[in-house]
Image: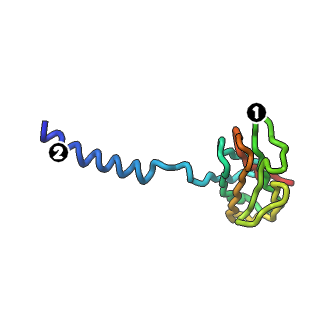
């Protein structure tokens, strides 16, 4: 019994370390590479997406907060920034360069949100 315990302790230690290092993926950034794609983060107050431009194109990123299955229309429903610059009315237009990454951050001040989403599409 004692020999088994000695063998089990290193395995448990490695497992615990892996859980600590890899367990919290809630802060991981989602990525998207397709124009017209939508990514949603669930019932969160802030959500980040890294968009890798597949082509040179004029694009727009938009954010929306879903409540009861429908986009919320309140002025504070959603806000959006691109590469740290705030956008107007949760919409960012930009000139994408093929292969370049753009970081979008959506946020909401609504008390209850089912889903906070970011869409990157042609304007």
Q: How many marks?
A: 2
122 up-or-down from 4: above or below: below
- Residue that lies at the very extreme toward the top in this rendered image: 68
Q: Position of residue 46 (x, y in %)?
A: 67, 52
> Closer to us: mark 2 or mark 1?
1
What residue is drawn where x is 84% and y is 50%?
75
* Mark 2: few/some/many CA within 10 Å (<14, 14-19, 20+): few
Dot 1 lies on which element? Answer: loop
Among the 4 quarters of the image, the one containing residue 12 = top left
Q: Is residue 26 left or right of residue 17?
A: right
Q: Is residue 18 left or right of residue 106?
A: left
Q: Position of residue 1 (x, y in %)?
A: 13, 36
111 up-or-down from 83: above or below: above
**What residue sits right under mark 2 in the picture?**
6
What residue is drawn where x is 40% and y is 48%?
19
Decide which of tag 2 and tag 1 comes sooner along the chain. Answer: 2
**What residue sits right under mark 1 in the picture?**
68
Q: Position of residue 121 (x, y in %)?
A: 80, 52
Whole-number angstrom distance, CA of label 2 to CA of label 1: 53 Å
- Name the disc covering residue 40, or none: none
Along the viewing direction, whichever of 29 and 37 lies nearer the viewer: 29
Among the 4 quarters of the image, the one containing residue 85 = bottom right
Among the 4 quarters of the image, the one containing residue 69 = top right
């Amino acid at each position: 019994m004692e020999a088994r315990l000695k063998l089990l302790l290193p395995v448990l230690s490695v497992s615990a370390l892996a859980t600590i290092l890899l367990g919290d993926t809630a802060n991981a950034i989602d990525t998207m590479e397709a124009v017209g794609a939508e990514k949603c983060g669930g019932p969160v107050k802030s959500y980040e997406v890294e968009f890798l431009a597949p082509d040179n194109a004029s694009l727009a990123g938009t954010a929306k907060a879903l409540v009861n299955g429908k986009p919320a229309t309140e002025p504070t429903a959603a806000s959006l920034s691109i590469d740290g610059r705030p956008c107007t009315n949760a919409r960012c237009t930009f000139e994408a360069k093929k292969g370049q990454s753009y970081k979008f951050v959506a946020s909401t001040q609504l008390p209850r949100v089912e889903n906070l989403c970011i869409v990157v599409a042609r304007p």
